[in-house]
Amino acid sequence: MQRSGIRDSEVWSQGDAEAAERYIAPKYKIFHDPGDPWEGRELDLTAYKARVRTLRAAFPDQHFDIQRLFADGDAVVVTWLWSATHQGELPGFAATQKRIFMSGATAYFFEGDRLAGHWQITDRLGVYQQLQAAKSAA
């Protein structure tokens, strides 16, 4: 299970949306992820891959640095640090070319050996503040 949580971070870091077919369940639920337009939705594999591509279009060099992993039953919690250069459009923000940083924690839920959903807390406000500062400086 822990390896699947790490692989999800690697897909996001490397942008290999097609790799999701190897470890994402046919239905993936985003239970809690405030500020994420997909929050509360159940995604099939096509929608999951589209989500990866959409977010990587704004931040193509994004990288997750995993800090800690905790396993409990059918869940793995990952704490992480994220960094990326804002190179593509994000709603409300044209590309700023600014390096952005964020921290967060994600609880991944499993069905067998496949990821079936997550519950996530991130510092999205901090990201928007960094983007706004870059926008104001331009």
Image: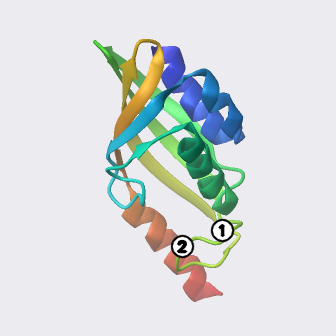
The residue labelled by disc 2 is 131
Looking at the image, is 19 positioned above or below residue 125?
A: above
Looking at the image, is 38 positioned above or below residue 49?
A: below
Whole-number angstrom distance, CA of label 2 to CA of label 1: 8 Å
Q: Give the side of residue 87 with respect to residue 9, left or right.
A: right
Name the residue at 65% across, 40% down.
13
Where is residue 111, by image quadrant? top left
Q: Are marks 2 and 1 in contact (CB under 8 Å)?
A: yes
Residue in front for this viewpoint, 113 or 60: 113
The type of residue carrying mark 1 is Lys
Looking at the image, is 10 positioned above or below residue 101?
A: above
Which mark is drawn over residue 98?
A: 1
**Where in the figure is residue 106, as x and y percent of width and height?**
38, 36
Residue in front for this viewpoint, 68 or 28: 28
Q: Quadrant of the N terminus?
A: top left
Query: Which numbered disc flags the more N-terminal residue, 2 or 1?
Result: 1
